[in-house]
Amino acid sequence: MRVITDFETAKSIITSKSFDNYSMADRYRELEARTGLHFPHAIALLERLPVFLNGDIHIRIRKAMARQISQTKECQFAQAQTLFKELLQAHFKAGSRFDLVADVARPLWRSVSTAIVPRNEFSVELVDEIPGLFSPILSIRERLRIDRLIGEYAEVFPGEDSLILLCLAALGARPFIGSWSLSIYQLLEENPGRALSAIAWPEAYPDSSLTYVDRVCNDAAQERDFSFGERVRCMTHYSGYSMEQRKLSLFGFGAHTCLGKSISEKVWTMTTRELSGIDLVPNCLGKNMSRHSDPFQMPSSMRIEFR
């Protein structure tokens, strides 16, 4: 597989009609054929995730998701705003120790996602677990378990519309949780001994949990020195890119721009505004990264304390 680390080339491939999105549903069909096991619910869901779709179905699903975002955007932000104030009171105080991922970022995304997806006792947790289906090292047992949970959700909330809402919430989980946590922790590490109010908070996320996207070339791509069916990995967040380039690629390009861009940007602005008014000095206690998060770089824990 060819890895593209030139920004302009990666951007042109991502936006080109000569390249298709990588089909994760097809990978599960191959897994079924190879193992004799069945993943019908996972496949049904993956067939409705825009990042793995092409053509008319990609357009149809994105439009359905965009309508839901438009209808719930005020509720999404209101819930995030209310919860964040509660989290600040609970954790951002002298002598406090907490995990940025588990105690702040994940609850914050759940407050947003509950305005999107029908909720019962397992749907909120399912939103967090679905991205595990993308990992190449996830066990068969775990894949079957997530498939079963998706099936149970579909029984309670039948119909394609409910499945699309589940996809929408799951689609934003790791980009939001990972990018928020990585960005906050990076800024704290870069400003040791400095109060939150003294940090120069940037207007955009300085770090991203999504580092690449895969594309598969089609017939038209052969004239560009790519072979039919070749899988190409386009780096979107790469150490060799400038800060401006990273900012441009943060939410993707063109028809593949992240549907959650608006709420994500609003939450970041809210976050930096609130933190810039806190005089506490944070201390970074260490971080751990997940092994089951491909194509994302996901922190499993990021511990900090306030003196």
Image (cartoon, helix red, strand yellow):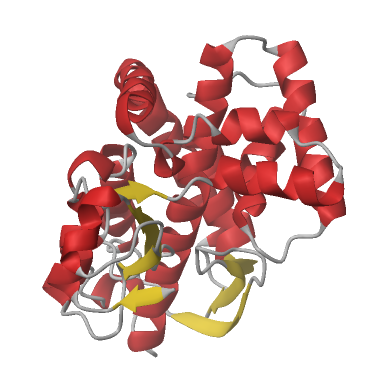
Please tell me whether residue 21 is drawn above or below residue 101 in the rendered image: above
Camera-side residue of 135 and 188: 135
- Residue 129 seen in this snapshot: no
Q: Residue at x 37, y 69 (%)?
A: 183
Q: Residue furthest top?
A: 159
Please tell me whether residue 169 is drawn above or below residue 201 in the rendered image: above
Q: Residue at x 29, y 61 (%)?
A: 277
Camera-side residue of 196 and 207: 207
Q: Residue at x 30, y 84 (%)?
A: 239
Q: Does 56 sit left or right of 116 as displayed? A: left
Residue 201 placement (x, y as % from top left):
23, 68
Camera-side residue of 50 and 217: 217
Please tell me whether residue 154 is drawn above or below residue 16 in the rendered image: above
Camera-side residue of 11 and 188: 11
Say which quarter of the image contains residue 94. Answer: bottom right
Say which quarter of the image contains residue 302. Answer: bottom right
Residue 245 placement (x, y as % from top left):
15, 70
The count of marks equals 0
Q: Does 86 sit left or right of 17 as displayed? A: right
Residue 290 placement (x, y as % from top left):
64, 70
Q: Residue at x 64, y 34 (%)?
A: 43
